[in-house]
Amino acid sequence: MNRFAMACLFALAFLAPAGAQATQENQTTKAVKATFEDVMLELQDAVIGRGLVIDYTGHVDKMLERTAEAAGGVTTAGGLSPYLNAKYVQFCSAKLTHEAVNANPQNLSICPYLVFIYETKAEPGTVHVGYRKPVFDPSQASEAISEKINAFLQEIVDDVASAEY
């Protein structure tokens, strides 16, 4: 499967509507009153400012609009997408990923980390920033690194959400 197709699958998995309970348990999202562009810049700065490199930026909004009719994804209101804007950034922390895979090689599945932002047509001017919690193997060693990585991703989301816009 090519990189674009994989990115689209990641995007759909992260941004697809889910039940309220699953959303609360599996992801963290905060709302910000700001322009999408300002929040996106703040997110990029939060990642890069930690010495990390953004591997890829996914444009979920454009993908959904481009594929809506062919995929039968036209919204009930007749739109091609519920989003005004929706993107995600992928990145990894070498230090944290080394710890994760040393705990269990299967923890490779948590990389890259992904933080998303979106603004819906129903709530223009409110931008949501968040991440889906990575799933690790159930060992005690993996639980310790899981806590570190979730705290790291939460710190990025909190920094973006608390910025002065």
Image: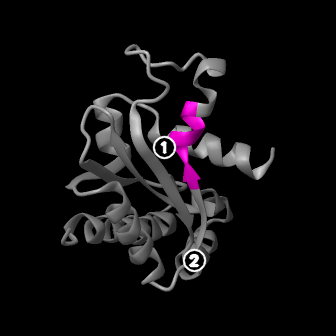
Q: Which residue is mark 1?
A: 14
Which quadrant of the figure has residue 157?
Answer: bottom left
Q: Is residue 37 left or right of residue 97?
A: left
Q: Position of residue 132 (x, y in %)?
A: 43, 51
Q: How many marks?
A: 2
Inter-mark Cα distance, 2 to 1: 20 Å
SS at circle 1: helix
Q: Quadrant of the C terminus?
A: bottom left
Report if the CB atoms under discs 2 and 1 are less than 8 Å apart.
no
Against 106, residue 62 (above or below) is above
* Residue under the point 56% across and 41% down: 62
Q: Position of residue 102 (x, y in %)?
A: 62, 74
Q: Give the main secondary structure, helix, strand or loop, of the magenta stretch.
A: helix
Q: Is residue 160 left or right of residue 91?
A: left
Q: Looking at numbered disc 1 in the image, what kind of residue is underneath it?
A: Phe
Against 10, residue 109 (above or below) is below
Magenta residues (range): 58-65
Residue 23 belongs to the span the image colors magenta = no
Against 164, residue 117 (above or below) is above
**Going from the N terminus, do you reach mark 2 or mark 1 first?**
1
Name the foreground residue: 36 vs 25.
Answer: 36
* Residue under the point 44% across and 83% down: 50
* Residue under the point 23% across and 57% down: 34
SS at circle 2: loop
Q: Is residue 110 visible?
A: yes
Q: Which mark is residue 53?
A: 2
Q: Position of residue 25 (x, y in %)?
A: 32, 43
Q: Is residue 101 left or right of residue 28?
A: right
